[in-house]
Structures are given as C-alpha cells and as structure tokens.
Image: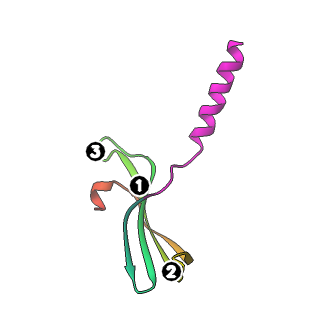
Amino acid sequence: MRIIILATLVLGLLGLAGCTPPPVLIAQGFSGDRVIRYTIQNVGAGNDDTGNLYDLSVKLCNQADDASDQNCKDTVVLQNVYPGSVY
C-alpha cells in the first residue's frame, strides 16, 4: 500500500514539474479598437542576485463590438529578465 501511495505522489510531482505557470497580466491599455496586454511568465530560477527570471510578452488584439478579442498577435519582447528591471 505504501508503494502505491509513494508511486502516485512521485508521478504527480513529475507531472507538475513539466507544466509552465500561466502568464500574469501586469498592464492593459486601449488604442482605438485595439487592446494591448503586457504579461510576464515565470521561466525559471536565475542566480542569487536576480531570483526568478521571467519573459515579458505583449499581446495585441482587435476588439469587436461585443468586446471579444479577434486577430490576436503575441510577441515576446524580453526573455529571462527579473521583474524589477521591467517595471
């Protein structure tokens, strides 16, 4: 019984290790009928000075009359930066 529980826990932890965390919205703005969203996503640990490193992305979408996003374009602006250097 202990082996089954231990194996389940190990497989669960391995499954979680492969998942990337979701991006976090840090700013949003509008320009005419477009919406601009800035997000950061944790990509891993840096060194002792920087801590965790993040990617900064910009998402640009057209906004329809019903407030739905259309024709979205994602662009990674900066890779492997620490949050204090971005904002």
Q: Residue at x 62, y 35 (%)?
A: 14
First-in-chain label (1 vs 3): 3
**What colour-coding does the image apply?**
rainbow
Question: SS of the residue at dot 2?
Answer: strand
Span colored in magenta:
1-24
47 or 57, which is in the foreground? Answer: 57
What kind of residue is marked 2?
Gln
Q: Nearer the viewer, mark 3 or mark 2?
A: 2
- 77 in relation to 13, above or below: below
69 or 13, which is in the foreground? Answer: 69
Would you say 65 lies left or right of 87 here?
Answer: right
Does 11 appear in magenta? yes
- 12 in relation to 70, above or below: above
Question: SS of the residue at dot 1?
Answer: strand
Q: Give the labeled residue for mark 2.
A: 63
Q: What crowding class fits label 1: few (fewer than 14 Cα within 10 Å), some (14-19), or many (20 or more)?
A: many
Q: Give the labeled residue for mark 3.
A: 49
Characterize the magenta stretch by its predominant secondary structure: helix
Q: Which mark is residue 54?
A: 1
Residue 63: % across, % down: 50, 80
Would you say 70 lies left or right of 4 here?
Answer: left
- CA–CA distance between discs 3 and 2? 41 Å
Residue extending furthest bottom? 32
Q: What crowding class fits label 2: few (fewer than 14 Cα within 10 Å), some (14-19), or many (20 or more)?
A: some
Residue 28: % across, % down: 38, 70
Q: Residue at x 59, y 32 (%)?
A: 13
What kind of residue is marked 1?
Tyr
Q: Nearer the viewer, mark 1 or mark 2?
A: 2
Does 77 appear in magenta? no
